[in-house]
Image (cartoon, rainbow, N blue to C red):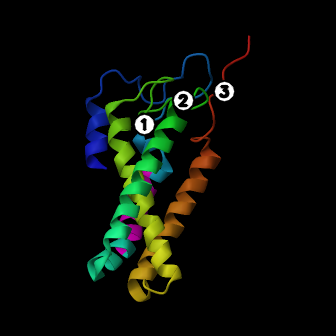
Amino acid sequence: MMIMYLGQQMDRSLPPRRSLIPGTHQAFIYMEDFHTMLWGDVIAVPLIITGFIHVAVQGLPLAEWLILFGIAIVDALGFLLICLGPNHKPDQGFPQAGKVSWNGLLHLPYHGFGVAMSILAIWHACWGELNGVPLHVALVGGAIYIISFIADIRAGNFDPLKRIEK
């Protein structure tokens, strides 16, 4: 998160925080404006990943490591395609249609591996291989992330680009 934040802070090509996106009434938002990045990634993700780490230190077979990398790559590419799409509202990671910032590039593997580790933690929880305190910690993290995600939806942070009609 800190590396992504530094990438955002050092990128002088980004519009000012909360400035209006040209042709819209929507604000250009930075990392600290997303509930999922502020509360979700800072608090919830480390708790969720605790579940994966607990399972990983027990020893994951090579196939599961390959699955982890496969999910991470597919997720990162999917996230990239969504964010490069014409209806994606510009933000610090994808400041214009078809453009990725340093923050956006740094966010892709972070997002991919976060999703992959979460999926594998859920998989192992369903099979009873993640339980007890590590499971409860991961579940608390999941609840915090879901609340953060809902807060972003309600705040309009994930709204599509809404151009002003003339």
Q: Nearer the viewer, mark 3 or mark 2?
A: 3
Where does residue 147 sit, x and y in percent of width and height? 56, 61
Q: Amino acid at mark 2?
A: Ala
Q: Is residue 153 above or below residue 55?
A: above
Instruction: Check residue 38 for magenta coloring.
Output: yes
Where does residue 133 sit, x and y in percent of width and height? 40, 86
Quadrant where the C terminus is found in the figure: top right
Residue 30 has which mark? 1
Q: Amino acid at mark 3?
A: Lys
Q: What residue is rendered at 49% in x and 74% in y?
A: 123
Q: Amino acid at mark 1?
A: Tyr
Where does residue 26 sit, x and y in percent of width and height? 59, 28
Q: What residue is rendered at 41% in x and 42% in y?
A: 31
Chain-order first, disc 1 or disc 3: 1
Residue under numbered circle 2: 27
Residue 117 has which mark? none
Q: Secondary structure at mark 2?
A: loop
- Between the C-alphas of marks 1 and 2, the distance is 10 Å
Q: What residue is rendered at 48% in x and 30% in y?
A: 18
Q: Main secondary structure of the magenta part?
A: helix
What is the crowding at mark 1: few (fewer than 14 residues within 10 Å), some, or many (at least 20)?
Answer: many
Q: Which residues are magenta?
A: 37-50
Q: Is residue 166 above or below residue 48?
A: above
Instruction: Check residue 35 for magenta coloring.
Output: no
Q: Secondary structure at mark 1?
A: loop
Name the one closer to the observer, 117 or 138: 117
Q: Secondary structure at mark 3?
A: loop
Verify CB contact (< 8 Å) between mark 3 and mark 2.
no
- Between the C-alphas of marks 3 and 2, the distance is 11 Å
Residue under numbered circle 3: 162
